[in-house]
Amino acid sequence: MSTAVHPRAEPAPPPPAHQGRRRREARLAWWLIAPAMLLLAGVIGYPLVKAVYLSLFSDTIGGKPEFIGLGNYRRALTGDASADFWSAVQVTVQFSVFTLVLEVLIGTAMAMVMHRAFRGRGLVRASVLVPWAIPTALTSVLWRWMLQPDGIVNDLLGKTVLWTGSQWPARWAVVIADTWKTAPFLALLVLAGLQLIPEELHEAARVDGAGAWRRFRSITLPLLMPALMVAVLFRLLDVLRIYDLPQILTGGSNGTTTLSMLVVQASVEQTKFGYGSALSTLTFLLIFVVALLFVRFLGSSLMPTEEGKES
């Protein structure tokens, strides 16, 4: 006995009046976002295009710059200044990795504590946000005093460490100061994600006999991942262009010169506008590629898709 298979009926096209209304709404949307797009083009697009343009010319002082094409880029990547450039790239990547790992661990722990209900929770939340509210310049000066040979950090450790006297102590000084400064920001974003998780899920898991670690691993962490990845992306973009904290804390000595510091040294201190523009363009490309890879391989897998919503 055969069963007839009827083809799936195609949805009827929207009426002409509905199509006209959608076109009017689309035009209105474009008119509404046009001022913001023009503002972004002026604030972001013009400096970027200007930097790329200047990077194609020489650094002649007192004369007319000459067009040299990709000469400044070859100098940074493979030429006489490549050692300084790749060293700055290494330092920037190391700062990014170390600070992100510490801030994710510390920020998540702080958010878990602030999320719990206890007496004085409001005071704890306000206290946690104090380091983030302090300007970065003051944070740098504060930690420079604390990391002096006779400072409070060495007193607590019971030994004398020259934090800015050699390479790795100086790098760890920058990492510690930056983590202390910005971990509360990541904790604030993670706390917002925790407050969106329904408490009924934890109650059901508790009734089923799941312990605290099992609830965190099976419920809290998966549901927290989208908010956590947004926080990590914000911090990643921020730390890849870090400048003021290591500049004030160490002055770039002992292997703590980042890409942004190298750009300022070339453009401002050495008045090499062409080479400095090339360095700034390479820094922008690095940040853009890292952000693109992050969103492509991590962000898309954590955000719900339309198919997932329908299923």
Image: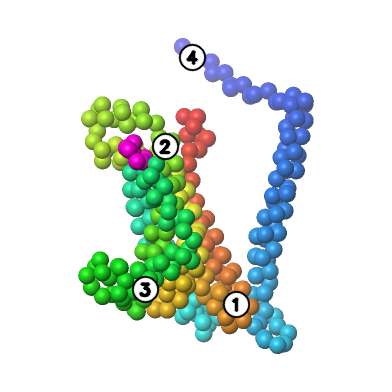
- Nearer to us of marks 4 and 3 is 3
Q: Earlier in the sequence, mark 4 or mark 3?
A: 4
Which residues, given as a range, are shown in magenta?
Answer: 115-121
Residue 142 location, quadrant = bottom left
Q: Please, what is the three-letter code of the amino acid marked with disc 3?
A: Ala
- Visual colour scheme: rainbow
User: Can I make out residue 221 in this image?
Assistant: no
Residue at point 65%, 65% (across, down): 48
Q: Tell me if mark 4 has few (under 14), some (14-19) or many (20+) residues whose alpha carbon lies within 10 angstroms of its own.
A: few
10 Å neighbourhood of mark 1: few (<14), some, or many (≥20)? many
- Return the x and y of residue 54 as percentages of the image width and height: 67, 74
Specify the principal SS of the magenta part: loop
Q: Name the residue under label 3.
A: 170
Q: Mark 1 points at which residue?
A: 267
Residue marked by disc 2? 195
Q: How many numbered marks does the figure carry?
A: 4
| Amino acid bearing label 2 | Gln
Residue behind mark 4: 2
